[in-house]
Image: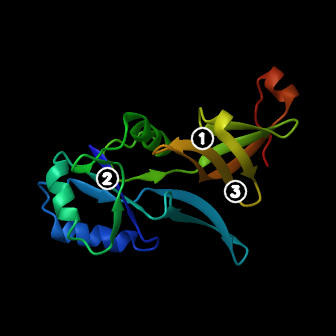
């Protein structure tokens, strides 16, 4: 099962190191921070970078929640465990796990949790068409696309709250209505 703990933003990697050192591999299968790929411009050149998808949260995979809970109480960087239930914390819901897997292109084991850059095209009338990536089938949840910064803001429900998630986009072409009719979809940007 997947679990989430809230930590001080900026301390996620430190918390992961502490958890991996202090908790047995038999209890903690994996501990990670999901990231997103983006393209940012530095000194006039575009670079691909990674940023935390949910800053301030560390995700864990374990089949022994009671033991994991007891061990986590020993970690000083821990702020709080999310979803407390009875004497330990609850796993992420199936819906939340599916959302994470969707954002991270089918990631199913937390080993390489990265949300890739979505490829998009702009149709006539400035309509955006999602061609590939985590934004596929999330069109109705996209609140804003900033082509200049190459970011799409998606509103999702995650862990019981509505959250704005920023995902990377890359515009790969323009589509004209006439070219769609003729079967020639791309007009290079």
Which quadrant holds residue 42?
Answer: bottom right
* Residue 119 position in % (x across, y down): 64, 44
Residue 22, given in percent of the width and then of the height, sits at 17, 70
Between the C-alphas of marks 3 and 2, the distance is 26 Å
Q: What element carries label 3?
A: loop
The residue depicted at 57 percent of the width and 42 percent of the height is 156
| Mark 2: secondary structure | loop
| Residue in view at x 49 percent, y 63 percent | 55
Mark 2 burial class by Cα count in 10 Å: few <14, some 14-19, many 20+: few
Residue farthest front in this picture: 86
Which residue is painted at 20% across and 70% down in the image? 74
Q: Residue 150 carries which label?
A: 3
Are circles 3 and 2 on residues that touch, CB within 8 Å? no
Q: In which quarter of the image is residue 123?
A: top right
**Nearer the N terminus, badge 2 or badge 1?**
2
Residue 135 lies in what quarter of the image? top right
- Between residue 185 and residue 7, name the one nearer to us: 7
Image position of 120 (left or right of 78): right
| 106 w.r.t. 10: above or below | above
The numbered mark, 3 or 2, whose residue comes first in the sequence reads 2
* Vertical comparison of 180 with 33: above or below: above
Camera-side residue of 175 and 188: 175
The label shown at residue 111 is 2
Q: Is residue 23 left or right of residue 103?
A: left
């Amino acid at each position: 099962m997947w679990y989430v703990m809230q930590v001080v933003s900026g301390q996620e990697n430190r918390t992961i190191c502490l958890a991996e050192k202090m908790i047995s591999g038999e209890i903690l299968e994996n501990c990670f921070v999901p990231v997103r790929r983006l393209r940012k411009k530095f000194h006039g050149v575009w670079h691909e970078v990674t940023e935390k998808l949910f800053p301030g949260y560390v995700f864990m995979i374990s089949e022994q929640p009671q033991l994991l809970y007891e061990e986590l109480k020993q970690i000083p960087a821990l702020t709080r465990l999310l979803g407390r239930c009875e004497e330990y914390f609850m796993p992420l819901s199936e819906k939340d796990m599916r959302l994470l897997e969707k954002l991270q292109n089918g990631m199913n084991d937390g080993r390489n949790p990265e949300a890739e850059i979505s490829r998009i095209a702009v149709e006539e009338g400035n309509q955006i068409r999602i061609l590939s990536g985590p934004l596929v089938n999330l069109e109705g949840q996209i609140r804003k696309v900033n082509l200049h910064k190459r970011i799409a803001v998606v509103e999702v429900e995650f862990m019981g709250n509505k959250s704005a998630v920023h995902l990377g986009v890359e515009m790969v072409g323009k589509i004209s209505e006439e070219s769609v009719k003729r079967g020639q979809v791309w007009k290079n940007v």
